[in-house]
């Protein structure tokens, strides 16, 4: 199993949830009002007067065979509107309870 964390501009919330529904990723944990800045060209998301936009993040634990499809969907969403921003990160899951 893998943990996939998707960090995205809150403007993409409905798209990300729809993507998870279409890929039958049912379980996830969502974090709202996540602050940060993209590695290469992303502008800060701080919720301030200067940088008013905010991010959210979702962590989902999925079977290995869903990871490729999920990452492909994230790539497509990012390509649709790159300045809004969405990124995904994958970790191995050793055990769950």
Image: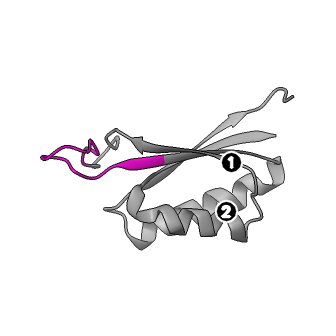
* As drawn, 53 above or below 29: below
Q: What element carries label 1?
A: loop
Q: Is residue 44 found inside the magenta-colored segment of the image?
A: yes
Q: Main secondary structure of the magenta part?
A: loop
Q: How crowded is mark 1: few (under 14 residues within 10 Å), some or many (20 or more)?
A: some
From what the image shows, is residue 4 above or below residue 73? Answer: above
- What secondary structure is marked by label 2? helix
Q: Mark 2 points at which residue?
A: 20
Question: Bounds of the magenta span?
Answer: 43-56
- Residue 48 percent location from the top left of the image: 19, 43
Local crowd size for mark 2, using a 10 Å CA cut-off: few (<14), some (14–19), many (≥20): some
Residue 63 among those drawn in magenta: no
Relative image position of residue 82 (x, y in whole percent): 36, 64
Query: In the rendered view, does 42 fall on the left or right side of 11?
Result: left
Among the two numbered marks 1 and 2 on one chain, the one whose residue lies closer to the N terminus: 2
Q: For residue 39, what is the image quadrant?
A: top left
**Disc 1: which residue:** 28
Residue 84 in percent (x, y) is at: 34, 61
């Amino acid at each position: 199993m893998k943990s996939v964390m998707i960090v995205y501009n809150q403007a993409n919330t409905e798209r990300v949830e729809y993507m998870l529904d279409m890929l039958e990723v049912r379980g996830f944990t969502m974090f709202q009002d996540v602050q940060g800045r993209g590695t290469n060209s992303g502008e800060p998301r701080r919720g301030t007067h200067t940088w008013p936009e905010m991010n959210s993040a979702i962590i989902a634990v999925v079977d290995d065979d869903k990871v490729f499809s999920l990452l492909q969907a994230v790539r497509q969403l990012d390509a649709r509107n790159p300045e809004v921003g969405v990124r995904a990160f994958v970790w191995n899951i050793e055990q769950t309870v």
